[in-house]
């Protein structure tokens, strides 16, 4: 385990910046940054940007000096690097392209949803999460699901379109937004189905035989079955979204959420979801619960 820093060489805001990364754990990286008084707003998905004036101090605190190329190689090897396609303009372009496959005649609605997902206060419920859900649906949808595809994909786009950090209220507000924005654009039966599916993400507990609900809920929870690095990134982002909550209160609430997820039997309702993500998800959830004490 090590925290690495490259030489200040990235110009912005009238100075140059270094990158600060961990070779193994976002938890380690955030702890190092917090101890050094680096604000969380300096964190950019897989690294901290730190101004040149702090370079020597951070080295003295234990950050290991490496070249920019070596830092990138170490970050890739750690599994913590965010690929370029999941960043900034490329991410938005990828999502805009996907929107054109679901409601191509209504680009303005797609832009509105992308703006909502890109709100500055979000840390986990971001365009990155939206793309991950849509990519999980690519894996889960089978040819016989074709009739379900559009409402399920639209529900993915809307399921966290409203996000203020109020569980239950956000999902209900997102469902209401879907009803308002989709009325007259697709058949009313599909609008009602999108609304129903968005509301299912409150508890992620679709009934047996609810294939559409199972698809959406499994896709939304697929992050739980990611690699250790991916799960670390998810857990860190969730903590960031609730940064206004004191540690003790957050830990109590997070323990409750983790226990509820572990208690879901099965956690994933589709055969593909169980095969691809279930075992690793339970390991990740239990490990986080153990870390919380």
Image: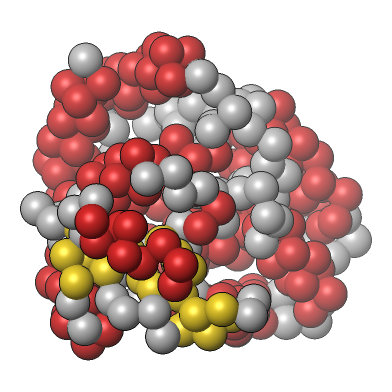
- Image x and y of residue 207, in percent: 43, 29
Relative to 282, residue 273 above or below:
below
- Image x and y of residue 79, in percent: 19, 65
The image quadrant of residue 86 is: bottom left
The residue at 9%/53% (across/down) is 1
The residue at 56%/63% (across/down) is 127
Residue toward you, 188 or 238: 238
Asked if residue 90 shows in the view, the reply is no
Q: As drawn, which residue projects farthest toward the left?
A: 1
Residue toward you, 90 or 98: 90
- Image x and y of residue 190, in percent: 71, 53
The residue at 59%/42% (across/down) is 197
Locate the C terminus by quadrant: top left
The residue at 55%/23% (across/down) is 245
Relative to 63, residue 70 above or below:
below
Relative to 106, residue 263 above or below:
above
- Image x and y of residue 172, in percent: 72, 32
The image quadrant of residue 198 is: top right
Residue toward you, 38 or 163: 38
Q: Is residue 38 shown left or right of residue 271?
A: right
The image quadrant of residue 105 is: bottom right
Asked if residue 208 shows in the view, the reply is yes
Q: Is residue 93 shown left or right of residue 131?
A: right
């Amino acid at each position: 385990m090590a925290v690495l820093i490259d030489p200040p060489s990235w110009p912005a805001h009238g100075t140059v910046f270094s990158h600060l990364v961990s070779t193994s754990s976002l938890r380690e990286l955030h702890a190092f940054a917090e101890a050094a008084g680096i604000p969380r707003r300096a964190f950019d998905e897989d690294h901290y940007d730190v101004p040149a004036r702090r370079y020597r101090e951070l080295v003295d605190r234990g950050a290991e000096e490496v070249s920019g190329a070596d830092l990138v190689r170490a970050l890739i090897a750690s599994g913590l690097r965010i690929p370029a396609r999941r960043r900034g303009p490329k991410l938005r372009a990828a999502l805009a392209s996907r929107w054109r496959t679901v409601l191509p005649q209504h680009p303005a609605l797609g832009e509105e949803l992308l703006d909502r997902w890109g709100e500055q206060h979000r840390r986990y419920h971001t365009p990155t999460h939206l793309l991950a859900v849509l990519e999980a649906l690519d894996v889960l949808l089978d040819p016989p699901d074709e009739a379900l595809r559009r409402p399920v994909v639209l529900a993915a786009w809307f399921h966290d379109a409203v996000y203020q950090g109020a569980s239950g209220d956000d999902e209900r507000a997102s469902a209401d937004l879907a009803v308002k924005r989709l009325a007259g654009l697709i058949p009313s039966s599909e609008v009602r189905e999108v609304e129903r599916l968005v509301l299912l993400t409150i508890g992620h507990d679709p009934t047996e035989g609810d294939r559409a609900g199972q698809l959406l809920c499994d896709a939304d929870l697929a992050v739980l079955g990611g690699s250790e690095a991916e799960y670390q990134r998810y857990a860190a982002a969730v903590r960031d979204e609730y940064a206004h909550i004191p540690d003790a209160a957050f830990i109590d609430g997070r323990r409750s959420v983790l226990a509820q997820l572990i208690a879901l039997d099965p956690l994933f309702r589709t055969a593909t979801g169980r095969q691809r993500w279930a075992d690793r998800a339970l390991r990740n959830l239990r490990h986080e619960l153990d870390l919380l004490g």
